[in-house]
Amino acid sequence: MLDRILLSRFRNHRDTAVEGTAQFNLLVGENGAGKTNVLEAISLLAPGRGLRRAALADMPGQAFDGGFAVSAALAVPGGEPVRLGTGVLPERPSRRLVQINGAEAPAVRLAEWFSIGWLTPAMDRLFMDSAGGRRRFLDRLVLAVRPDHAAQASRLENAVRERNRLLSDVRPPDPHWLDAIELQIAESGAAVAGARADLILRLDAALAALPDSPFARPSLAYRPGGPVQADALAVALHDGRPRDRAAQRTLTGPHRDELDVTMAGKNQPAAECSTGEQKAMLIAITLAHSQLLEGGGEDRPRLLLLDEVAAHLDPVRREALFDRLRAGSAQIWLTGTETTPFEAILSEASVWEVSSGSVRRL
Ligand SMILES: Nc1ncnc2c1ncn2[C@@H]1O[C@H](COP(=O)(O)OP(=O)(O)OP(=O)(O)O)[C@@H](O)[C@H]1O
């Protein structure tokens, strides 16, 4: 469980403390008050760019002096709380700093302590937008079961970027340097592809086993962007050099993977389903993933950030969502403009009112 969350000079929060958290945590306030900013701050305590995928330069509060800091205490079973922090210093605004228990650490190490998932209004288009968003979504699901996935995925991304740079250079690339880069892509790529394929298989089985649910049930399939075995991927990269040089980018590999989602029963691609059906499928995936984690002996604490999710569900689906979440062990963060949709959990939730970048416990 995350507690004592401090936001300093983060977006419209000058100095915000969120303390006394529970399993259900509710942030209420009018539009633009700063609720999502709190969730975004929490999401930055995990590897990656957070739930808005914003640039670091957008995060320091415009009204303040530059730089920002976010920190929180994470309760861990049988030990002292772990202090996690991130931010940027005013004098080095482009460098993200991460601290774990006061010591500087690479961001990927945050994944060792807890896992996090989120659903935000921006994800309403997840099935319709480009494949990159679905890969990132998938990678967050994988990260919850494999803390080393962030490091592998970032190794892959860097190696692909370097190969693309070599291929688009006007000078012919040094073949030995290409060999070395392709070896890195093959090794990290096979690890990334294997982890994604494995998770999708397990998640699809968990979805099929979900007890009667009012949420549309998706079925998931992995469509690899290239050979999934390291040796075969290395050969494909080597053989594809002339083609990739002409295209000035790497056309095969897990950086081109797809997560195919169809609505079970209807056999309809998710992108062609109604907005409500798409949202329901995202919720079903989130719930099945939570169930997978509960059953898989995963003991890292889990957080789920649900931005403006509950208010958009009808009462039956909302109750079903709360029931499922209550049965799990994840700490849940919800936002809304009023408390009415949250009646069913109010007595057990910690509730904060957010207003113009400040937070008051109700
Ligand atoms: N870097 C920044 N500095 C200062 N204010 C910022 C910064 N970035 C965003 N904001 C402000 O934060 C507010 C948006 O906050 P947030 O998205 O958390 O609102 P919200 O409470 O979730 O609203 P809604 O209910 O509309 O989703 C806006 O007023 C915006 O101008």
Image: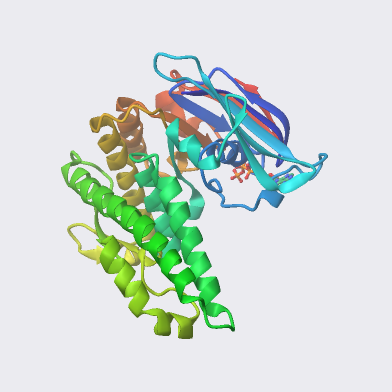
Q: Position of residue 300 (x, y in %)?
A: 38, 28
Q: Position of residue 116 (x, y in %)?
A: 44, 38
Q: Quadrant of ligand 1?
A: top right
In the rendered image, which quarter is residue 330 located in?
A: top left
126 vs 151: above or below: below
> From where the camera sits, is residue 211 visible?
yes
Residue reaching furthest to the front:
176
> From where the camera sits, is residue 227 visible?
no
On screen, residue 210 versus residue 135, left or right, reads left
Color style of the picture: rainbow
In the rendered image, which quarter is residue 292 located in?
A: top left
Looking at the picture, tell me which residue is in the foreground, 241 or 82.
241
Which quarter shows the C terminus? top right
In the rendered image, which quarter is residue 135 located in?
A: bottom left
On screen, residue 70 versus residue 47, left or right, reads right
**Residue at horizontal 55 percent and vertical 34 percent from the top:** 338
Q: Position of residue 84 (x, y in %)?
A: 57, 29
**Residue at horizontal 57 percent and vertical 40 percent from the top:** 44
**Residue at horizontal 50 percent and vertical 80 percent from the top:** 248
Q: Position of residue 105 (x, y in %)?
A: 57, 35
Looking at the picture, tell me which residue is in the foreground, 247 or 271.
247
Tag count = 0
**Residue at horizontal 27 percent and vertical 60 percent from the top:** 222
On screen, residue 310 versus residue 36, left or right, reads left
